Amino acid sequence: MVDVAVVSFAQAPNVRRDYDRNEVEILSPVLIDVRNKVGLEKSDIDFVCSGSSDYLAGMPFSFVGGLDGYGAWPPISESHVEMDGAWALYEAWVKLLTGEIETALVYAFGKSSLADDITAVLTLQQDPYLVAPLWPDAVSLAALQARAVLDSTGHTAEEMAAVAVRDRANAKGNPNAQVSGDFSVEAIMAEPYVVSPLHKSDCPPISDGACAVILAAGDRARDLVEHPAWIRGIDHRVEPHQLGVRDLTVSESTRIAAEKASASGAFDVAELHAPFTHQSLILEDALDLGPDVTINPSGGALAANPIMVAGLTRIGEAAQRILDASAGRALAHATSGACLQQNMVCVLEGS
Amino acid sequence: MAERVAIVGCGQTKHDTKRDELSMHGLVREAATRALDDANMGWADIDAVVIGKAPDTFEGVMMPELFLADSLAAAGKPLIRVHTAGSVGGSTAMVAANLVKAGVHERVLTVAFEKQSESNAMWALAPVIPFAPPLVAGAGGYFAPYIRAYIQRSGAPDDIGIRVALKDTNNGLLNPYAHKQMKVTYEEVRDSIMLWDPVRFLETCPSSDGAAAMVMTSEAHASSGSAPPAWIHAMAWRSEPTMLAHQDKVNPRAGRDCAADVYAQAGISDPRREIDVAEVYVPFSWFEPKWIENLGFAPEGEGWKLTEDGATAIDGDIPWNPSGGVICSNPIGASGMLRFMEAAMQVRGQCGEHQIDGAGTALGHAYGGGSQFFAMWIVRNEKP
């Protein structure tokens, strides 16, 4: 079995709307930064894989612009998933396991501000025959799930608000965070609903962003950095799409992925891709995280939620804490689709 | 350390202008159930699902793999969605194969589709990009100047495109799944309307609804299919930028590099002699001579001679696209997988009337974008 590690992570500052730069201009400095951190030239990268969505850019082949920004000359070995960049990392991890390559660069970009209403764009992820014609927006679908959580799990609205307080306080230490500060449960509970039972602070910000990760195998990783963040387990699972045929209050796919990724025992940190506060509660239950785990030291998706990017950012943020030796074992989670339809769990270790 | 990968199940839809009796769910299930039946497997036997398709704007849906999870029985399993432009069908097959090759899964279902009747692909491919001149309306307008450049550079007779279209269209009559089912004559192709000079109506691909699916397994399950397995001997992909001042858009370096990579992996030094049949992505007839040269089947400037001499005919010494190819069926996201799968079907002996006798080594090829994305594999009827 090939050992694969994250050896470098870089990201763009997450902002509500980058007026001055298009996606490629946001991404390009990140692609250079992630290589410079470990002193790799483009010619040292054996495989490139990316994640993005045409529906954010509102045009076909938007990923081609990202590749042009990378500068694919001479021609490169390259692939793309129409998914969060976390799944591009998974594809690169699989390719590293085949033993054909030693290094891979993974990137993701998304400029949600281009849409007039990103929550309506996300409606187009719904089944076009039975659900999308009803035009449920992303916040309403999340609210449906939140209401089910409050009605049947024993979790409370105050617990949801406390997630936002925790994440945004953590985000004060993250220079790339978009929303950070000292919030209070009382103040959040007093906010008007966006869609009941979700207050504004239960919802993620709309973010423009990009990030990149470099993976390396075995001795190549040891040569590049002092503390490689070894991927000890990674798995992802999907759930039924029709909301009526699954239990929205639990995350069975996260539980299976965690089991397959051997995500048990103690963790120093966990980065959870939970765009809405109640989703963090669902994930913490599914992952059975103990009280000693620092959850979302970066602030998570409630501090910045660049769509197609935020999942890969979770893996990068978790890995960064091992790279800088502030953590020994970390869990990272990524999600895709409405109401946590698809989930990935990644276990990273420093030794 | 890498596992051998076998293709044990192949299935495709009947490709047509409008499969309006089927939803997208129904379309992918038609191909997937045929692949599972061919593999003698059920949904529960599958460990993971890999879906590919071209831009989501073709159907007006965002990330349709999320709702197709239900129709492909993916709940509780890993699901991956690949999108690499026109080469996506090939790339998707490779992503699925790598899951087996890496030892992550034993049995993987891969499906590629396009339901182009949901929209108009030509206009879906004609985005208005801020600060960029709106130069193209669809792929034909984009590629016609490069075809003209090929004709001028090679000195090819100007009826080579007609001959390719004649061959591929009539081959389609031997393939019951092909969209176009029409007997054409040289004169009918020649006299068909000029769409994008020098590309005539009958020299271009149709717009199709269709899907392709394969079941790939590790060696332990390789004998489960209804026909002997096809074994993957080589896979490669290459990408290059859209526009670069010194790149050759007629004979792209990414294509040459990709071909050199798969030939090296498969131990092939003379593709024309060592490959028995090729399924190559030829959406406009003139791409056959272009790709003959790009893939090293003939020296540069001489690819058209293979077409003219009938070498690429179904009874020639190196048949290209006996299935009728993209000229007969073009559900864009599936077109690359159809090439990869037809190559596998040839070495499995599953091609019926368009079977090449004794096919032991086959090339599957896909390309996309502005001739900048390439995916290829070599399959054989013998183990690597």
Image (spheres, coloured by chain):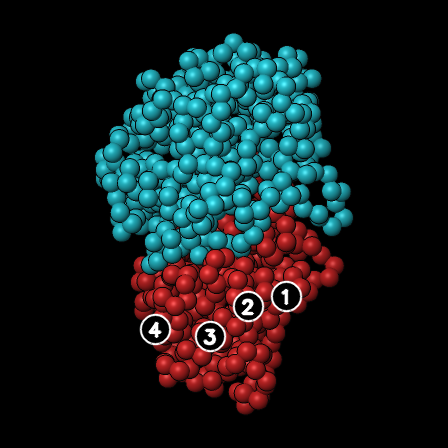
Q: Name the residue under label 4.
A: A288
Q: Outermost residue toward the top? A: B309
Q: Do the residues labelled 1 and 2 touch (CB within 8 Å)?
A: yes
Specify which label sits upstream in the sequence, 4 or 3: 3
Question: In the rendered structure, the residue with mark 1 lies on which chain?
Answer: A
Q: Mark 1 points at which residue?
A: A117
Residue A14: x percent and y percent?
62, 65
**Residue placed at 44% from the left, 74% from the top?**
A145
Question: In the rendered structure, the residue with mark 4 lies on which chain?
Answer: A
**Which one is in front in this view, the residue at disc 1 or the one at disc 4?**
1
Q: Name the residue under label 3.
A: A144
- Residue type at the position of mark 2: Asp
Frontmost residue, A309 versus B211: B211
**Which one is in front in this view, the residue at disc 4 or the one at disc 3?**
3
Specify which label sits upstream in the sequence, 3 or 1: 1
Secondary element at tag 1: loop
Query: Chain B takes which shade in the image?
Result: cyan
How far apart marks 1 and 4 lie (CA) works out to 35 Å
